Amino acid sequence: MTICNRTVPFLDLSPTTDEIRSEVGKGWQLLLDSNVWVGGAAVEEFEQRWANYCGTEHAVAVGNGTDALHLILRALGIGRGDEVLVPANTFVATAEAVVLAGARPRFVDVHPDNLSLTADALEAAITPSTAAVIPVHLYGHVADLPALADVSRRHGIAMIEDAAQAHGATRDGVPAGSVGTASAFSFYPGKNLGAFGDGGAVTTDDAHLAATIRSLGNHGRAPDGRYDHPIVGTNSRLDALQAVVLTAKLARLDAWNECRRDIVRAYRERLGDLPLRLVEPDAGVTSSWHLLVARVAERDRVREELAHLGVHTGIHYPIPCPEQEPFAASSNGTCPVASRTAREIVSLPLHPHMDLDEVEVVCDALSAVLTQGPR
């Protein structure tokens, strides 16, 4: 069963790197001349640009997306004795950050269509111990923030957006990362806005919260005292080298996201009536399409046969958090939607420089695998 001799990678970062290579080189040359590697003008410039882009008053650059969540929780005073509600089908870092803060994650099942946390599920899950909820903008599709925020306000809990996959996404024109008490972003290389290593940021309109997070990520240091450490912090700071990369990429993010949307439209046109189901955003959501996820029967067989045809895929995520050994005690019962869909989901190739011929190869391979049955 041969479609063509072309291999389609799941992700190719080379074209985006090539697009900014010259600009980053010039920026790094300035850093070589300045010898300012941690903090400084490059980081401050990126923080200001990122806050402006997200529509918030403040952005604090940190070491990675997990730290962003962890530091938000700590800055809000959430810890021992508190529980934080987390969607069952997120990446493990969302729950991990809760444990690192000393609190207990409690998992909530998701909607069977968009695989996102709903206001009704949140309302039903809140207990007297609930201190916060972390909606996740899975695959770049912004969760129902207005409804979730309304429930959070009525119950007096913090809403922390996990926007690690939603750079540039909006809901009803409102940017991801601008609605919650605070929001966490990851700049892992494969993200829509990815560094050349690890990186992350917190966005918020709360000046005191931003200052506390900045202090916590800088060894608990006071803003005006190098050797004054009024709180116990940690070391989570964005390198200036990464800030240069992110600033260069940020100028191109909207264009790259629009390319992703064009590619998704091409997929939709070519997939036709094949027996699969794309996970789509809600009406009113302009997704960043970090991932293009389909649901199929016999997912593992489908992936194996696609790989045989040269089409490489991913799974995000094959084991729901409540089924991971460290979080079993926090599962609070079963999450049937997350459990069922974890066996169906497959992430198809998608990146902003993907060409339509590659989309054609993927769709032809899917057609062969899904309509002709096992090899």
Image (cartoon, helix red, strand yellow):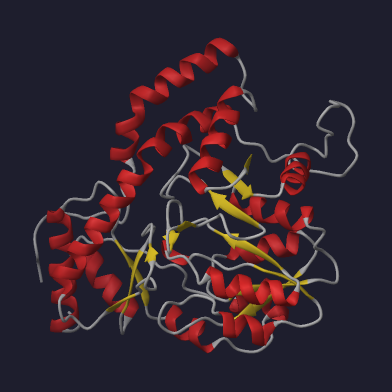
Q: Is residue 308 above or below residue 242?
A: below
In the rendered picture of this protein, how many numbered marks are placed on residues?
0
Image side of residue 167 versus residue 130, left or right:
left
> Foreground residue, 324 or 234?
234
Q: Position of residue 182 (x, y in %)?
A: 65, 55
Q: Is residue 144 above or below residue 222?
A: below
Q: Position of residue 25 (x, y in %)?
A: 40, 21
> Foreground residue, 362 or 233?
233
Quadrant of the rendered structure where residue 86 is? bottom right
Residue occupying the far top of the picture: 33
Q: Residue at x 62, y 70 (%)?
A: 149
Image side of residue 268 versus residue 339, left or right:
left
Q: Residue at x 63, y 74 (%)?
A: 150
Q: Position of residue 363 (x, y in %)?
A: 16, 68
Q: Position of residue 4 (x, y in %)?
A: 8, 60
Q: Residue at x 38, y 70 (%)?
A: 281
- Quarter of the image for the N terminus: give it: bottom left
Q: Is residue 90 visible?
A: yes
Quadrant of the rendered structure where residue 314 is? bottom left
Q: Residue at x 81, y 77 (%)?
A: 129
Q: Is residue 198 visible?
A: no
Image side of residue 375 versus residue 76, left or right:
left
Q: Is residue 159 above or below residue 89?
A: above
> Foreground residue, 24 or 372?
24
- Quarter of the image for the C terminus: give it: bottom left
